[in-house]
C-alpha cells in the first residue's frame, strides 16, 4: 500500500460527502444512488490509493454532506512522465450537481501540483449514477491507463516547443478568460504577466510545458498581488471548488494542445 495514502478516517475529516449514505432530497427518483466510498474501495482493490481529497464549499447548508468532492489516486509505483507521475482523478456529488467523472491526471514532483489531463477518447469520462457504475468506473480506470503512452508523448511535445514573449502573453490572456470569463479585463485582479511568473527556478523557461505549468499553478493556488475593480490591493483567491479545479485544469490542457497544434502547423 502507498505510504502517503489517505485512510478512510482522514478522507471523512476533509470530505464527509464521500461517505453519504443517501442522496440529497433534491434529486429525482431516476437517480441511482451509489456512495462514493464504494468507488474508492473498488479503485483501491485495483492498486490505486487516495492521496488527495477535497469537497466544494456550499452556501446552502442543506447540501452540506452531499456536495461535489474530488479524490486523486496514485499507485504504489506510479508511472513517471517527465517531471511528473500519473494519477487518477475522481469527481462526484450526491446532490445531483455532478455525475461520476474520471480523468487521468499528473502530479508534478517539483512543485507538488496536480493537473487534470483529458487525453484521447478516454479523457473526461462521465458515468450516470446507477448500480452498474462501479464496474463502469473500473473499466474506465484501465482505459485511462492505456492512454498513458499518449500522455507521455504530449508532455514530450509540449516540452520541446518554445513560446516567444508574445505567445506566452497570449497564452496567459486566454487562461485569464478561462478563469474569469470573456470580460476578464474587468474582473481579473491581475494582468497576464502575473501568471507567467515562476515560483521556483526549475519552472523558469520558455517551453510550452513550463508556460502551462506556471500559469496553471498561479491560477489554482492564487496568492498573486493585484487590484480589485475598485482599485483596492488584493491577492487572487486559490481555487477551492472541486468542480472548478477539474474544469479549469481540463480547459488549460486543451488550450495547451491548441497552442501545440498551432506551433506545429
Image: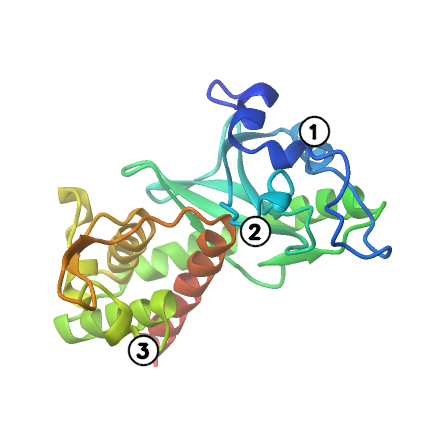
Say how many tags the image has. 3
Callouts 2 and 1 close, C-beta under 8 Å: no
Answer left or right for 154 relative to 183.
right
Answer left or right for 106 relative to 64.
left
Across and down, in percent, residue 232 comes to 14, 60
* Residue 41 - label: 1
Answer left or right for 214 relative to 30.
left
Query: For the residue labelled by badge 3, is the local secondary structure a helix, a strand or a loop?
Result: loop
Residue where numbered disc 2 is placed: 103
Q: Going 78% across and 47% down the picture, which residue do you hit? A: 133
Which comes sooner in the sequence, label 3 or label 1? 1
Gap between marks 2 and 3 measured at Cα: 29 Å
Callout 2 environment at 10 Å: few (<14), some (14 to 19), or many (20+)?
Answer: many
Q: Nearer the viewer, residue 159 or 251?
A: 251
Which comes sooner in the sequence, label 2 or label 3? 2
Q: Going 76% across and 33% down the picture, which residue do you hit? A: 21
Across and down, in percent, residue 226 comes to 15, 58
Residue where numbered disc 3 is placed: 183
Q: Nearer the viewer, residue 28 or 212?
A: 28
* Residue 180 - label: none
Gap between marks 3 and 1 measured at Cα: 43 Å
Amino acid at each position: 500500500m502507498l505510504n502517503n495514502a489517505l485512510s478512510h478516517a482522514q478522507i471523512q475529516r476533509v470530505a464527509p460527502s464521500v461517505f453519504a449514505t443517501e442522496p440529497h432530497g433534491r434529486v429525482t427518483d431516476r437517480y441511482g444512488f451509489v456512495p462514493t466510498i464504494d468507488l474508492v474501495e473498488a479503485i483501491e482493490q485495483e492498486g490505486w490509493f487516495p492521496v488527495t481529497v477535497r469537497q466544494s464549499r456550499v452556501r446552502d447548508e442543506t447540501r452540506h454532506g452531499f456536495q461535489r468532492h474530488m479524490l486523486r489516486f496514485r499507485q504504489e509505483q506510479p508511472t513517471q512522465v517527465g517531471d511528473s507521475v500519473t494519477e487518477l482523478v475522481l469527481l462526484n456529488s450526491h446532490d445531483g450537481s455532478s455525475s461520476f467523472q474520471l480523468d487521468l491526471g499528473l502530479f508534478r514532483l517539483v512543485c507538488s501540483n496536480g493537473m487534470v489531463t483529458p487525453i484521447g477518447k478516454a479523457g473526461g469520462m462521465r458515468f450516470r449514477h446507477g448500480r452498474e457504475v462501479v464496474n463502469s468506473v473500473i473499466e474506465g480506470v484501465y482505459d485511462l491507463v492505456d492512454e498513458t503512452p499518449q500522455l507521455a508523448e504530449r508532455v514530450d511535445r509540449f516540452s520541446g516547443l518554445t513560446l516567444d514573449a508574445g505567445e506566452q502573453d497570449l497564452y496567459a490572456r486566454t487562461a485569464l478568460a478561462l478563469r474569469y470569463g470573456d470580460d476578464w479585463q474587468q474582473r481579473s485582479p491581475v494582468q497576464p504577466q502575473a501568471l507567467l511568473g515562476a515560483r521556483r527556478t526549475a519552472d523558469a523557461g520558455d517551453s510550452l510545458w513550463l508556460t502551462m505549468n506556471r500559469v496553471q499553478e498561479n491560477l489554482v493556488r492564487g496568492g498573486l498581488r493585484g487590484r480589485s475593480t475598485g482599485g483596492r490591493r488584493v491577492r487572487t483567491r486559490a481555487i477551492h471548488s472541486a468542480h472548478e479545479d477539474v474544469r479549469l485544469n481540463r480547459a488549460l490542457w486543451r488550450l495547451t494542445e491548441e497552442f501545440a497544434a498551432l506551433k506545429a502547423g
